Amino acid sequence: DEALKKGGTRRRKKDGIDLEQMADAEIEDMRRRMTDAAKWDNEGRDRGLPAMHKLKLLPEVVALLNKNTLKESLVDPDINLLQAVRFFLEPLNDGSLPAYNIQRELFTALGKLPITKDSLVASGIGKVIMFYTKSKRPEQVIKRQAERLFNDWTRPILKQNDDYRK
Amino acid sequence: RPGMSGLPGLSGLQAAGLDEAAEEDFRAAFGDGTEYDWAIDLQM
């Protein structure tokens, strides 16, 4: 309900330009660039090259994820930026984890986003969080972050079902 | 429940007395906990 209320107020017009559409286009562009970077890193790893594409893009990704005014679009299941975040956090084809900076920065940014059940289902990002809680490879600080996200993200599911039954 | 053994959070949900709808939502959101087992196997 809260998301719907906010959704009605975030659409603004200025000089005939729809700011929300511009923001959505920016997020969609980033989703595409992130998806490409993740693909190129995987292809490079197969050829023994260092995975640099995601790291190079990371500052821009973090800057976008931290934009408070875009929070609802950032978790919008239709735009599905979170799927690209999932691609960044996924293990590479050889089972190795992405760079520590990628893990740390993205887990921190994810903790500030208003994740919903729909955004979890569309993106599959909950699945990669489960992986981080399960794998022995991540640093302890990352595993703790993953466990915290898992606990936070189960709440909307439990709450929704609780509300539904009332 | 077949296919759910890899799901660490499910036992908590069941312990909390949640219904099948909650379990379905949980699985849709978090998978069955085995999606990345291929990577964990490679990490061994």
Image (spheres, grey):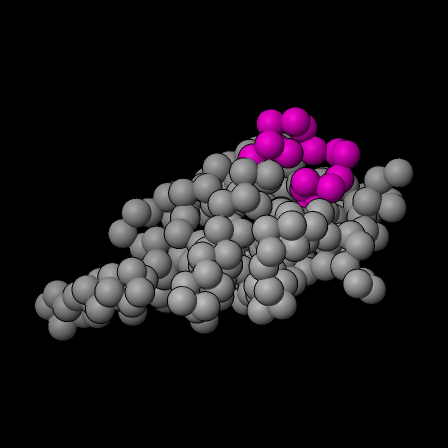
Spot occupied by residue A38 in the image (x, y as percentages of width and height)? 63, 53
- Determine the main secondary structure of the stretch shown in magenta: helix
Spot occupied by residue B44 in the image (x, y as percentages of width and height)? 88, 38
Q: Which residues are magenta?
A: A130-145
In screen coordinates, is A98 left or right of A26? right
Find residue A124 and report its image quarter.
bottom right
Is A131 magenta? The answer is yes
Q: Say above or below: A3 vs A150.
A: below
Asked if residue A122 shows in the view, the reply is yes
Q: Say above or below: A60 vs B30.
A: above
Spot occupied by residue B6 in the image (x, y as percentages of width and height)? 78, 52
Q: Residue at x 82, y 45 (%)?
A: B40
In screen coordinates, is B2 left or right of A111? right
Is A5 magenta? The answer is no
Q: Residue at x 45, y 57 (%)?
A: A159
Q: Say above or below: A103 vs A2.
A: above
- In the foreground, A55 or A78: A78
Q: Residue at x 39, y 52 (%)?
A: A114
Q: Residue at x 50, y 59 (%)?
A: A157
Q: Quadrant of the N terminus of chain A?
A: bottom left
In screen coordinates, is A80 left or right of A43? left
Find residue A102 and report its image quarter.
top right
